[in-house]
Amino acid sequence: MIEIRSMQRPMKGQKLLALILIAIATSARAAPLLLTHATVIDGTGAPALTNTTIVIDGGTIRAIYPSSSRPEPKDAHVEDLEGRYLIPGLIDAHVHITDVEPDIAHYKSFLKALLLGGVTGIRDMAGDDRLLGYLAQQSNSDAFAAPDLFYAALMAGPSFFAEDKRAQASAADAPPGSASWMRAIDAHTNLPLAIAEAKGAGATAIKIYANLPANFVQAITAEAHRQGLRVWTHATIFPARPSDAVAAGADTISHSAYLVWEAASQVPDDYAVRALGDFAHIRPDAPRIVALLDAMHRRRTILDATLNVFRDEAEQHPEKVGAGIAPWSYTVTKLAHEHGVLIDAGTDGSGLPDGADGNPDLDALPEVHAEMALLVEHCGFTPIEAIRAATQIGAMAMGQDATRGAIAPGMRADLVALTADPTIDIHNTTKIAFVVKNGTMYQRSR
């Protein structure tokens, strides 16, 4: 009896302590946030909902309903958004942020500038995963104000690592092609181990980049999927064609311009010619390219179009790209859209335009806004479709669409409040009142 009583007393104490902790947590919990009387563009491509209330609690959207149809919770914080518009937080589906800032303090300012510009998620398409892993840990836990970050480990043929200075810099202190996030692949590679090590580096996906034949693309993709990683590829991997990546089961393929190689008589072994396709003679609607687009539609392969970067390259460094690359890219992206291919919005840079000093301009708006505008102005998208490209489909590209990328009950509370209607003019996505990331409001002061 004595032993039983001595066990019961701590149990009662533990229960009391648990109740106290629950009471403390409950009292400290932030009040629900109600965004009322807003026009909601939910990111799915559906028409806008007017006079709508969104209930946010614990970082999650709990309810959406017509304003004034339900009583407001007594403890709620209410923001009346009469005359304003809500879209999901934007996702830049193709960035490279390694080396854009010199230290962590600068990265905090840089990432905050992206967030205040409406970007709540970014997909980094290869860099130094030691840095990216740290930044992802901090940003994805809301340790500092930043978009959530998901990133790749890159795989390519050995010749790529011998010649590409960017890859060498992203794995400094390691022999070229030997780092777990910058891995050379050949016939002797232990693929299960290489992909497990990439996963251990925190990568969401394997990026298949360059100088690999079709059978290697097939093998990498199968093993990555077996281990639960996504596969993101260049549209043309040299010598593997876009159709090889699609047939292998790649989740996304990047750069509309590189689709030109699908209809080329021969694809070189070296990726260095990637932007020098024959845009003057290969039509965007060539039979091989149309067949490719149909296959992408059937398999739900996402096209990561990256239009803005090639437009800028053609204007600033025309010698580095094939003549006609920008209009060709617009036309093939429009054709892909007409064929039902899913298309995201990625910028293939830091995510911010460069300032006069060559560094990211922290006072500028993120470039994903310009990418959306190109989809509307040149590729036949409606503004609502362009918003979907930069929200729901961007989330799909990251493999995160179950929890983000749309405004719906149960989804993360990542939102952008706008002062003007983006369904009338896509440029109105730049007219930002405030941003909500994971339920926390960030006011844009400039």
Image (cartoon, rainbow, N blue to C red):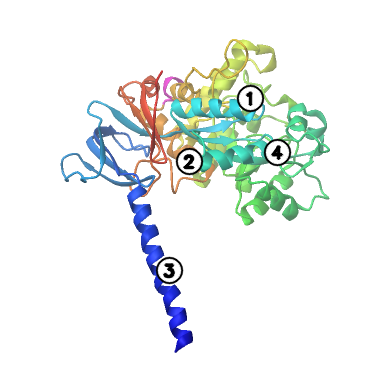
Q: Residue at x 39, y 44 (%)?
A: 59
Q: Residue at x 83, y 32 (%)?
A: 162
Camera-near label (2 vs 4) is 2
Q: CA distance from mark 3 to mark 2?
A: 42 Å
Q: CA distance from mark 1 to mark 2?
A: 24 Å
Q: Nearer the viewer, residue 383 or 229?
A: 229
| Callout 1: SS | loop
| Callout 2: SS | helix
Q: Of the residues under marks 1 and 4, which one precedes in the sequence?
A: 1
Q: What amino acid is at disc 2?
A: Ala
Instruction: Give yes or no for contact between labels 2 and 4 (Cβ–Cβ under 8 Å).
Output: no
In magenta, the rendered stretch is 376-380
Q: Of the residues under marks 3 and 2, which one precedes in the sequence?
A: 3
Q: Which residue is mark 3?
A: 14
Q: CA distance from mark 1 to mark 4?
A: 31 Å
| Callout 3: SS | helix
Assess disc 3: are there few (<14), some (14-19) or many (≥20) residues with their C-alpha within 10 Å of its C-alpha. few
Could you tell me which quadrant the C terminus lies in? top left
Q: Position of residue 276 (x, y in %)?
A: 69, 21
Q: Of the residues under marks 1 and 2, which one precedes in the sequence?
A: 1
Q: What amino acid is at disc 1?
A: Val
Q: CA distance from mark 2 to mark 4?
A: 27 Å
Q: Which residue is mark 1?
A: 100
Q: Of the residues under marks 3 and 4, which one precedes in the sequence?
A: 3
Q: Which residue is mark 4?
A: 240
Q: Which residue is mark 2?
A: 395
Image position of 349 with respect to 223: above or below = above
Q: CA distance from mark 1 to mark 3?
A: 51 Å
Q: Is any atom of residue 243 visible in this view?
A: no
